[in-house]
Image (cartoon, rainbow, N blue to C red):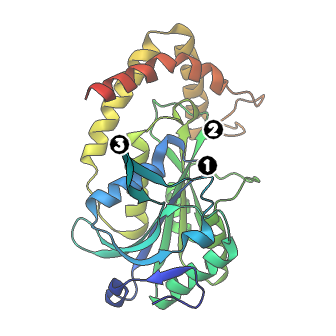
Amino acid sequence: MREPEGLYELTPAAEDVPLGLPLVAGLTGFADAGGTVAQLTEYFERTVAPVPVAVFDNDRLLDYRARRPVIEFEEDHITSFTPARLVLSLAKDEIGRPFLLLTGYEPDFGWEGFTAALLGLVERWGVSSTTWVQSVPMPVPHTRPLQVTVGGTRQDLIDSMSAWRPTTRVPANVLHLVEFRLAEQGHEVAEFVLLVPHYLADTELPAAAAKGLEAVSAATGLLFPIDALRDASRDFLARVDEQVGGNEELGGLVRALEERHDAYMAGNPVRSPLTDDEGEVPSADELAAELEKFLAIRRSHDEEA
């Protein structure tokens, strides 16, 4: 059936959604440092057996020219046409506990309508909590555990997990609007912003996906196997360390980031974990240029695998 809002269509599986489930969300398309949301989307597709319950209307929400569909072409004809999808699914964690999962693209159009439609689904199924993940590039060192900024209405998570609490103005994600509207209604909502080393922001960072899953587990109690991601992260960071160790200038820049990070985490009176007392940070271009060889080696290894 097509809902009156016209923005989504319920599938037959919608009849089987239990009431009171947590909702987990992550949408691609904006500031996905370390490929965090992209990795989580792929992870969930492989591991939690998502069954679509509401499929959103691309023609109302998607700019096809910005994110063009993919076709497959064989010799003289098209064999498939695969557009992007924005889907709310019913999924299960490692021990079979159900939850709702929102994945896909960030809408290009109709943010207010999309938010109203999603909040209608939250009300329809009595969603118990909403948790979402995003990531941003920051001048922090890869040699320290990834930190998060926590927003929303979950003061327990803010107190226990939020390493940096800025007062700032930044471009919004559509899920910021969803969070804002949910909070206005007294809904339980948690936003996790992963602070990814800016010089690794354009790579696929396994540690970011693992940290995102840990954050979701902390907010919801859901369990996800992450040993494979941790193993991949150790291998990835070992190769980064090797590259850093072979370049004196790059090593000095990383040590400067470490000093600022450690000073902030120890509670010293610095402005933030990202800057020194003068507000200066190492250039992302400097770090990125030095890591170019490493990334080329990594791509070569991936192609050989």
Question: Do the CB atoms of the residues marked 1 and 2 lie less than 8 Å apart?
Answer: yes
Residue 255 occupies quadrant = top right
Could you say whether the residue bearing mark 3 is in a helix, strand or loop?
loop
Q: Estimate the spatial distance between the alpha carbons at disc 3 and disc 2, rounded to whole Å.
A: 55 Å
- In front of the other: 52 or 230: 52
- First in sequence: mark 3 vs mark 2: 3
Give neighbour class at mark 3: few <14, some 14-19, many 20+ (Cα, 10 Å). few
* Dot label at residue 164: 1
Q: Report x, y in % for residue 279.
A: 76, 31
Could you say whether the residue bearing mark 1 is in a helix, strand or loop?
loop
Q: What amino acid is found at the position of numbered circle 2 in the picture?
A: Pro
Q: Report x, y in % for residue 235.
A: 31, 30
Q: Estimate the spatial distance between the alpha carbons at disc 1 and disc 2, rounded to whole Å.
A: 8 Å
- First in sequence: mark 1 vs mark 3: 3
Give neighbour class at mark 1: few <14, some 14-19, many 20+ (Cα, 10 Å). some
Q: Is residue 245 above or below residue 92?
A: above
Please name the residue that numbered disc 3 is placed on: 75
Question: Do the CB atoms of the residues marked 3 and 2 lie less than 8 Å apart?
Answer: no
Give neighbour class at mark 2: few <14, some 14-19, many 20+ (Cα, 10 Å). many
Residue 252 occupies quadrant = top right
Foreground tag (3 vs 2)? 3
Horizontal side, residue 157 vs residue 274: left or right: left
Quadrant of the frame with the C terminus:
top left
Q: What amino acid is found at the position of numbered circle 3 in the picture?
A: Glu
Observer able to see residue 212: yes
Looking at this view, name the residue that lies furthest to the front: 76
Horizontal side, residue 85 vs residue 89: left or right: right
Quadrant of the frame with the N terminus:
bottom left
- In front of the other: 213 or 257: 213
Please name the residue that numbered disc 2 is placed on: 273
Q: Estimate the spatial distance between the alpha carbons at disc 1 and disc 3, rounded to whole Å.
A: 54 Å
